[in-house]
Image (cartoon, coloured by chain):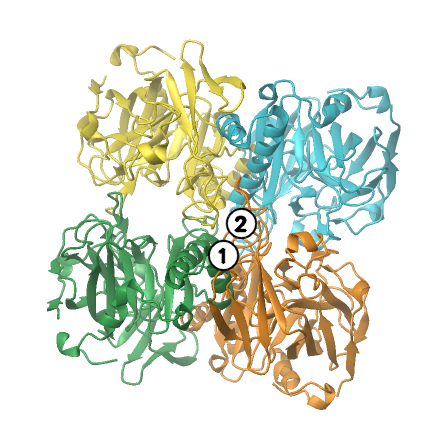
Chain colours: A orange, B green, C yellow, D cyan
């Protein structure tokens, strides 16, 4: 059984890239880690008058905790990251519009001559006990209780090819995928590109809608416990996620149909490998039985997921059983973290 | 209470466009209709040796039943089409790859110099009793039972601007949206563009995956009963769907992010109108509470849906209560059609 | 030698679609036609105070003259349309912004929550003698003389598959391609989809920039003389253009890279056919020697052209020599039309 | 007058990113540099049997020479890079197809289930004296002489936000823009993001077609002389190019319409600033008078340029006259490099 680590970053420890940064700690395959992540605004937005474009400074957005050096992880391996628990670290979550960022505004890339939308901040009450985040309209008295569904928007490793990529984008190395699937109880598989993998994470969300249309979720600092395992000699091309009920491939790209194509293509190949179906038979199965949840349609790269229910795999062993193994991590290994 | 109609098309009755065709029958607001739709191959594929590109002739693909002239429907009105029941008309559903069509192949528009994928046909056993469609691999003995979830891929009215559009595409007039949401128990709202609306439908699916990645669902002829209602003086810009639990806006476009933008934009406006929220407050609510199921990523226009759970509308009346009214259509009005 | 026709439309003669309209006159292969086209605003914008969204009524935008029934043109043939002369019919050209239309604004499809740009009209003096159109800033005294380069934005035939398509869009049938290449001295090849081909044209531009970024060119009514020829038994999949110096394939699609792919794919195949090169050798030649002028990036479908200089064809005969033949149309055949 | 530098890289000096590398030499504003760049294959392809996917190893593709530390260049400044001369360093240029790379094939991102196109190499004779590169078909005896038009596909600086980006992509920092406009006699303006700017260049092309449809140009090592100047306190958001006759903005993005939007948006703003026109008047001028040459439609980000003829600027001074000043660099400053 692995060792349990605790890492609490100080202000200078946050990173703003995947790749290009020195490790903050070392984990071994089988270890667990309890850590803390700041929200995407670096905690600078605490009232509705804290407009992000004024209180934040580029490029100091979307800080990530890490990187963690994963002992024995080498290019060509896969790093399994299992999220054991995510507990919001504050009772207030924040969201906002941001000038020329989001799906329903022109942006720096979908550039138009129109002025930006009004910048506005929303605060959400987070009631962890009740499992609820409370939306309050800024104009009028409308309120609504939405389910608290903690997730990490951003988890990734150092990219290949000597690259260092902003924590605001996602790609084959993971990063800012912004999918609600990255919640407690799921395992993320990332291809290792550099010695030590260099795992970082951040961008906790109390919840988000599909597509993150406004560009910003219900952002909150997070206490997170995770377990890692290195799967030797098994490469992974695009991020993959395993839950108790499904396997999922993640595509990160623009335009959005390429994110769809990548995810479906990866899932077809994965399904063929796990079931023994030939490629066209797997394509057909995925096309009729699969779902395709959208992640984000607002970041520099969009994300789409392709999912297949596990029963269709007829008992095939996924990544050598890493998910089941990590799922069963004894709570003793992560002291102080209650079961979900 | 409306009148019940039955219309069974003969071979010459099928259409291949929305717009540009003479009506086959007339319905009045409040009426119900029981009709039959052929599958997207015109019923020509019955064995695995019936390759669609050989047994079908362009443009005689995706036949639609109709158009039905809706009495009193005028440009500026909305036509509500409630699907009361969909019953597969055969016990075999068919699917296939099709040369240069689908999401995981180059196409006539995403044109490459690569040869097409192998054309292959799959037959599915449909067991309506058990609520199951059975997938069988063409190579090997893999089989899997998937849920029978009957839906119509194609429902629409005549487009605006004197256009006639192929039944293979979708746009503001509806058409080949290919979303599993068009199932029994839901109401589709379509803006009326021409005198009589000219409703047509077809392309029954025993089920489909999200995105219809292979370009073809589990295709089957369908016995369908629906009810219509004209909502006078209320225009509808893009197709909308209402179920018992959610409202949904449909975007049809390329690239896929434009389909996303259209659907989210429409849902934000609709939500604002129903709740009294201002636009940015509605944007924020949809962004955190909405889902975004993908329809098709294979047709000439892609579809994405933006959905909001009804409880967030706090009792607002949607389209003058058409869905509740049509949902309650007495079965007596549709003799021989069992309840869902 | 063919017959010369003159057709001057009256108000009721204009069409707003390709397909779905009755012919206004008949031409035979080899005939010439002198006709008149209205500007895209139907002539309704004559001062800077005539805002198009106020003086025009949807869908009565972009009127086309025609359709002309081309005798002996059958599906599977190609219609060659040679533009002999284009003479602006007015001395004032008009341009404008238009709400939520154009490349540098959000649109009905690239939908955002931002309000539209200011709607503004510009008038251009057209000096045909000097070959100049004069731009005048609306604010300030900046003026600039730009080259008069008359062209038709919109030329097409009835689409396949029983469709009727708005004159505002383009596709395999031609239509609103908005490329400066459609100028006097060039031949447009269009695949014939219906008995009689049904040729229409309109949308004269005194000039336009590449991409038509503002959504509107320097619009002007046009006196146009053209010659037609039917090339029997030769199908054409996408529009093609031949000038004295180059062959060009036109792609119409979204996203823009699909328009690029279609045009390059078509040009590679055409080059292979004309030169005897195999596909990959033709691909390589086009990739190093070709140009790719952008047509429009504002209409419902975008256009890109793929061009190859004719000397690389080493004397191959293009469409049975139609361009040379039509280029040599004696002026006597088109009385009153001066040589270019 | 500046100092002249010569830098000839050894094998270990090549870089594969912009950002993340230590400088190889220092230049001061006003200095000139003569250097050497390897071809995109690192010189490994010398016969038609050297298939790139076999003789090259990822990520060691598209080596760049540099980075050069530019003294006094600070974030917020602009670096002007004037290309004085480009002389192919070999008499053979190479091109190829590459598996799943290029515009007319599915790719890693536009992922399909089709196998890649055949990988094939072409060799071109470069006759600098005659100004010609000779294409030879691999199958058959077709040959063609194309104009020798030397250019750099790849020129850039370190990106902002602590990023290091592969030399295969392009973005706001420049990089692999692959536009024929980067030829001798032009000045490239790049925003400085880091202390010292960190200029690198590579990817010489004897010529390329527009769009680089096959993914590979006529690749050749290059002897290049350039001059640099730091324009203090003037930021530049996206790459810009100035020639003797035009100003150009470069957009790098997917989908291709976003590259178009970025470039047009930047040119409109630049034109407004230089002419004093208001934004809409500048938009109108660019829309009617501008051209939009496509750069690449094959790399991870596509490039489009927006160009305006200089006479329309009515004598406005561009970047404080840097282009004229650098254009006049005395040849004495660059010994051994003949004027073009």
- Looking at the rendered structure, the secondary structure element under dot 2 is loop
Q: Name the residue under label 2.
A: A117
Q: Is residue D288 above or below residue A81?
A: above
Tell me: D3 left or right of B182.
right
- In 3D space, how far apart are the residues under numbered discs 2 and 1 (Cα atoms)? 9 Å
* Quadrant in the rendering for residue B214: bottom left
Q: Which chain carries label 1?
A: B
For the residues labelled 2 and 1, say whether their Cβ atoms are less than 8 Å apart. Answer: yes
Dot 1 alpha-carbon crowd within 10 angstroms: few under 14, some 14 to 19, many 20 or more = many
For the residue pair C181 and A281, the one nearer the viewer reads as C181
Q: Which mark is residue B280?
A: 1
Q: Which chain carries label 2?
A: A
Quadrant showing the N terminus of chain B: bottom left
Q: Is residue D339 above or below residue B194?
A: above
* Quadrant in the rendering for residue D109: bottom right
Dot 2 alpha-carbon crowd within 10 angstroms: few under 14, some 14 to 19, many 20 or more = some
Q: In this view, does C246 lie above or below D65?
A: above
Q: Residue A13 carries which label?
A: none
Q: Is residue D70 above or below residue A306?
A: above
């Amino acid at each position: 059984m692995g060792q349990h680590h605790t890492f609490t970053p100080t202000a200078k420890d946050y990173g703003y890239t995947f790749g290009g940064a020195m490790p903050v700690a070392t984990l071994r395959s089988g270890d667990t880690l309890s850590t803390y992540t700041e929200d995407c605004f670096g905690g600078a937005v605490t009232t509705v008058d804290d407009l992000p474009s004024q209180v934040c400074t580029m490029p100091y957005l979307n800080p990530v905790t890490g990187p963690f050096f994963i002992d024995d992880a080498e290019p060509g391996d896969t790093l399994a990251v299992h999220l054991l628990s995510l507990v919001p670290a504050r009772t207030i979550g924040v969201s906002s519009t941001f000038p020329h960022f989001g799906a329903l505004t022109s942006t720096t890339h979908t550039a138009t001559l129109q002025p930006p939308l009004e910048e506005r901040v929303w605060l959400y009450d987070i009631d962890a006990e009740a499992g609820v985040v409370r939306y309050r309209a800024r104009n009028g008295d409308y309120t609504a209780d939405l389910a608290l569904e903690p997730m990490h928007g951003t988890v990734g490793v150092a990219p290949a090819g000597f690259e260092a990529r902003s924590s605001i984008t996602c790609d084959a190395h993971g990063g800012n995928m912004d999918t609600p699937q990255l919640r407690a109880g799921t395992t993320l598989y990332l291809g290792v590109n550099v010695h030590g993998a260099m795992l970082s994470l951040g961008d906790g969300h109390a919840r988000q809608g599909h597509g993150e249309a406004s560009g910003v979720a219900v952002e909150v600092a997070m206490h997170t416990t995770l377990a890692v395992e290195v799967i030797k000699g098994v490469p992974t091309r695009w991020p993959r996620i395993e839950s108790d009920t499904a396997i999922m491939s993640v595509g990160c790209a623009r335009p959005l149909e390429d994110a769809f194509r990548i995810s479906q293509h990866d899932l077809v190949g994965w399904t063929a490998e796990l079931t023994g179906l030939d490629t066209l038979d797997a394509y057909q199965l995925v096309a009729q039985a699969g779902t395709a949840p959208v992640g984000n349609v607002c970041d520099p790269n969009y994300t789409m997921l392709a999912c297949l229910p596990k029963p269709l795999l007829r008992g095939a062993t996924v990544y050598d059983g890493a998910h089941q193994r990590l799922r069963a991590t004894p709570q003793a290994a992560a002291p102080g973290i209650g079961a979900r």
